């Protein structure tokens, strides 16, 4: 995973992330927006939606975790070579407080990228809070040459 | 968390789990069915749905994890006293293979229940597979006397 | 990771596990014994030792986790081809109760083995308890052809 | 967990952390030093030691994780009321690279402290590296009034 910068402009990388995200039915269904992409960091936004609540009326941890997982996955993807695909190996998510708010910012960033495995951290913030209400540690893998798998 | 059996019939416990699950907007939106409930074990079912896919066309890990989280949460809830509410503290999920299939079984079971924390494991199976394609280890907490929180 | 059985006898696999374990200074220092090995399952034993306690006098979670990590790592190694080396990618450990006892059994088993990643679960039992006091979910990787790395 | 500052000077908090750490047989055996303590952040140091290696001669992941666990645990303890004890509920550790080096810095910091649960992150650095070789996400709990448990 050496110097992807040498092989791809930032514009091409951002387009690659956006194109892959646009193919995630789940992110479209959740109404997720791509707020910002740089190499090693992706920010997504999610709005409160009654279709995705848990039994107490807050956003379901699973919805929050799904978007954090995508934020981490695309942060990893942003530092992978253009021909790689990205898959989640495993993640741990802590729910630090209920997902109470109208709009949520979900930020994934790369901690360290190895040859095939990339470890990321994610944080979720509600409205204008400065402390996260959820934290993720995720392990992503780069895949090459798998038929039917791209992006 | 001693002898909840002494305080509540199995029928009442099952009704309590079902009533709480029915209030999860996210589970309704995902089309999740409650297949089986016993003390310490809950099985849910999910069907393939293009609204919840990732970029390669498989079900999104986030959708699978959300349902596994609910299966584990309700397994924990099934051994809690009737007046408790359940919240997820943290979980780790491993995606062992793509979520490829038409119908998925998601099973949560209690490993050990402490006074407030309950640790569960979850496994997700596709169609008639005998090996899981996803595995979860989850930590749930019992809440008491929180205004606005029940179930 | 297809049919390692075809390529190596059980005796050779057990010898390979034992030889690698014997090179772990940490396991020798902790006084860990290899109790049982079969393909996909390894059991280790640890004794209470004041050199490895935490501040309340129980065995330190880190000592328990280290041995569970080795039990999981060797369970994974037991299903890998003989030329592979094994490394831990990540694990999650839950401490369900204090590590109170004289002798601890630490058991690792393979949940599912992929081409390079192997996911395992570990459980730790004190004395004659039938419920674990610690539970692990671990992701191991097979390495090939890395200079200076074997076993 | 409101305003522990109001109830205890920084000096008293640091003394409380040091006193508890000094009772961990495992940290003494590993030769761990307390480098720095502030509210919500603890730095420990570990030296390479052949007694605690894995099969390839690097420090065992379990030794690194044990010290990261203590760094996180004491970061959590530093924001708890003086009468609380601290226990690890669960942690996830990623081994991003082998623990190759002579001296390791292990830093735990609080992400968010709730009433009883405190979530922390830990990072381990070798020698003068600026990127971590291990990352932890940990959940700690405060205990009150448990006979035989203090610190």
Image (cartoon, coloured by chain):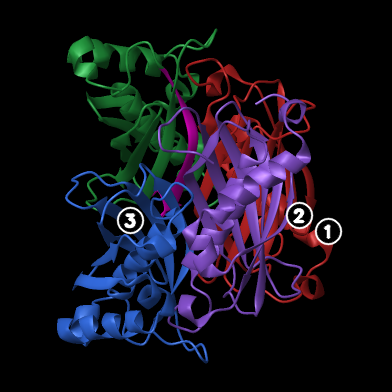
Chain colours: A blue, B purple, C red, D green
Residue corresponding to mark 3? A121
Where residue D61 sits: x, y (%)?
48, 45
**D34 lies left or right of B133:** left
Residue corresponding to mark 1? C11
Q: Which of C12 and C94 lies nearest the eye of the viewer?
A: C94
Task: Say which element carries label 2.
Answer: helix
- Report, in whole angstroms, how far the alpha carbon at label 1 lies from the one at label 2: 6 Å
Where residue C147 sits: x, y (%)?
47, 66
Question: Do the residues indicated by labels 1 and 3 lie within the same chain of the protein?
Answer: no
Relative to C52, say whether A2 is above or below: below
**C61 lies left or right of D37:** right
Residue corresponding to mark 2? C15
Disc 1 versus disc 3: nearer the observer: 3
Q: Residues within 10 Å of mark 3 (few under 14, many from 20)?
A: many
- Contact check, label 1 and label 2, Cβ < 8 Å: yes
The stretch in magenta equals D85-100
* Rendered residue at 39%/71% (across/down): A115
- Report, in whole angstroms, how far the alpha carbon at label 1 lies from the one at label 3: 42 Å
Q: Is residue C23 visible?
A: no
- Residue C89 part of the magenta segment: no
Residue D141, by quadrant, is top left
Task: Say which element carries label 1.
Answer: helix
Residue A35, by quadrant, is bottom left
Q: Residues within 10 Å of mark 2 (few under 14, many from 20)?
A: few
Relative to D18, say whether A49 is above or below: below
């Amino acid at each position: 995973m050496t110097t992807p910068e040498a092989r791809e402009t930032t514009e091409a990388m951002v387009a690659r992330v956006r194109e892959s995200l646009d193919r995630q039915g789940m992110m479209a269904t959740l109404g997720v927006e791509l707020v910002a992409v740089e190499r090693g960091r992706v920010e997504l936004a999610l709005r409160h939606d009654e279709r995705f609540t848990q039994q107490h009326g807050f956003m379901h941890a699973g919805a929050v975790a799904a978007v954090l997982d995508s934020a981490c996955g695309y942060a990893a993807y942003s530092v992978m070579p253009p021909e790689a695909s990205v898959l989640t190996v495993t993640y741990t998510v802590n729910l630090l407080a209920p997902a109470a708010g109208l709009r949520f910012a979900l930020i994934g960033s790369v901690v360290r990228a190895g040859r095939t495995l990339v470890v990321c951290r994610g944080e979720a913030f509600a409205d204008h809070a400065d402390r996260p209400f959820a934290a993720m540690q995720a392990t992503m893998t780069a895949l090459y040459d798998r038929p039917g798998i791209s992006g």
